Image (cartoon, rainbow, N blue to C red):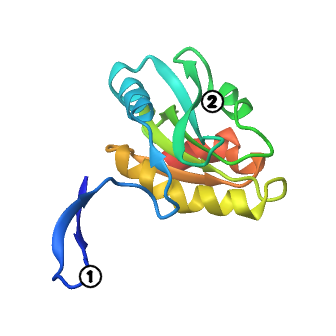
Amino acid sequence: VLPAFCALPGRSRRRCALPFSSMSGVTVRDECVDTFNQIKMKKDLRYCVFKISEDKKFIVNDCQGPAEETFQDFVKKLPEDQPRYALCDITYETDDGRQQNKLCFFFWSPDDKTSVKDRMLYASSKDAIKKKFVGIMKEMQANDYGDLDEKTVMEAMK
């Protein structure tokens, strides 16, 4: 809950509390934060994908994959005609040969197969979900499957 100022007719401004939501009015469901904590702390998920609900009021869980799945399995879960938010625990090799993991936030917004309205709704709601996910190490935006080339993503993790 963030403090804000409320202006009432005939009165001076006073502080009041408003629930945090995005500029679009979309709010993040607690289940999304629970899933984020699961992937971050328990390390039993490879990825989780989030979407805006049908009524366009909430960001909710869409799907998730166990830690045994690969980055390619994650990419296959992203719909070709709808935007999504996603978290993926990416294992990569550093320049000195060590295995590392980074939690990466993806904003999937296919340009050619989604409506401008959907793309704008997702873009204006992105900060709401990112603010709930404290500790994300990387962020990437992908507008087609070429942006999710595994080699390119692994290089971006370094």
In the image, is residue 74 above or below residue 19? above
For badge 1, the amino acid type reads Pro
Eyeballing the image, is 29 above or below 65?
Answer: below
Numbered circle sitting on residue 76: none
> How many other residues sit within 10 Å of disc 2, few (<14), some (14-19) or many (≥20)?
some
- Residue at image location 49% in from the left, 34% down from the top: 93
- Type of amino acid at the residue the image marks with label 2: Phe
Dot 2 falls on a residue whose secondary structure is helix
Residue located beneath label 1 in the image: 9
Q: Is residue 158 visible?
A: no
* Residue 82: % across, % down: 74, 46
- The alpha-carbon separation of the residues under discs 1 and 2 comes to 55 Å
Which residue is found at the position 84% from the left and 53% from the top?
113
Q: Residue at x 43, y 27 (%)?
A: 35
Quick check: 95 left or right of 122?
left
- Residue 64 appears in the rendering: yes
Nearer to the camera, 124 or 137: 124
Residue visible at 41% across and 55% down in the picture: 21
Circle 2 sits on which residue? 71
Which secondary structure, mark 1? loop
- Quarter of image, res 64: top right
Residue 92's x, y, as percent? 51, 34
